[in-house]
Amino acid sequence: MLSLHSPSQNHLLAALPAAEFERLAPHLEFVPMLLGETLYEPGGQLQHVYFPTSAIVSLLYIMESGVSAEIAGVGNEGVLGISLFMGGDTTPSSAVVQTAGHGYRLRARVLKDEFKRAGPLQRLLLRYTQALVTQMFQTAACNRHHTIEQQLCRWLLLTLDRLPSNELVMTQELCASLLGVRREGITEAAGNLQRAGLISYRRGHISVLDRAGLEKGACECYAVVRKELVRLMSDVKHRHDNSAAAVTPRPTENQRF
């Protein structure tokens, strides 16, 4: 039901002062984000930015051979489509829904007009972009220097931070594709974590049983990414009025439930 969803579930939208939010609210489109759905293609013209609320989207770089690897993930803490306000209208990466859910999208023109006001939205987006760049740099270093088991722990923790529960829907094939490793490597790493009592895995569902244990098993990369996001956004205040809750989401024509 639409009444269960609100733009304030996205941290950036929730942090906008009432005046700025009310200016954007009529243009926000409530959209479902289906598992495996591609929101952006490499080199494609970006028409919208997306503010996920319950969905998680992977930014993937796809090589000429067809193999891919995740360079960053975006959930309710952020926005997809930074190229639109960073001076470009295309991106070399793909954006694919990793965890199904919902979000809100905003037309490129509306976003650019608001960004040019040089107000609170601009400052929020630039801070978030710095945090996203940190995630990209750290992911590249992690994929090069740390074990598959450490990478899996990092990835699970970053995903958990964007979810309301300790349950993930994820196949080994998809996880291997996101980390850019062979499925056998994920099978072995997940098996080790399960035998250690940190996770339970069955039929594409992962239950995290011991988060503290995962944090111990992860490399420093998770802490670096998390710390930078907290540092950049810690002084951001969320609205305490009812403006976000009062917004009636405007569904797209092809919305499916």
Image (cartoon, helix red, strand yellow):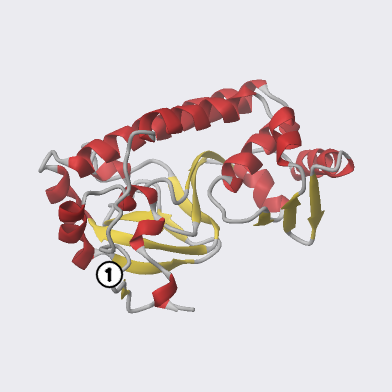
Determine the residue positioned at 34% across, 61% down.
Answer: 7
Residue at the front extreme? Answer: 240
Classify residue 40 as left or right of residue 246: right
Placement of 164 over or under 181, stated as above or below: below
Classify residue 201 as left or right of residue 164: right
The quarter of the image holding the N terminus is bottom left
Residue underneath mark 1:
247
Classify residue 102 as left or right of residue 241: right
- Residue 222 in percent (x, y) is at 59, 30
- Residue 248 in percent (x, y) is at 29, 74
Placement of 216 over or under 210, stated as above or below: above
Placement of 160 over or under 219, stated as above or below: below
Residue at the right extreme? Answer: 195
65 or 83: nearer the viewer: 83
Residue at the top extreme? Answer: 145
Determine the residue positioned at 57% across, 27% down.
Answer: 223
68 or 109: nearer the viewer: 109
Classify residue 170 as left or right of residue 104: right
> Is residue 136 visible from the viewing direction of this image?
no
* Label 1 neighbour load within 10 Å: few <14, some 14-19, many 20+: some
Callout 1, which amino acid?
A: Val
Rendered image quadrant of residue 102: bottom left
- Residue 126 in percent (x, y) is at 28, 34
- Residue 48 in percent (x, y) is at 28, 57
105 or 228: nearer the viewer: 228
Label 1 SS = loop
> Is residue 177 visible from the viewing direction of this image?
yes
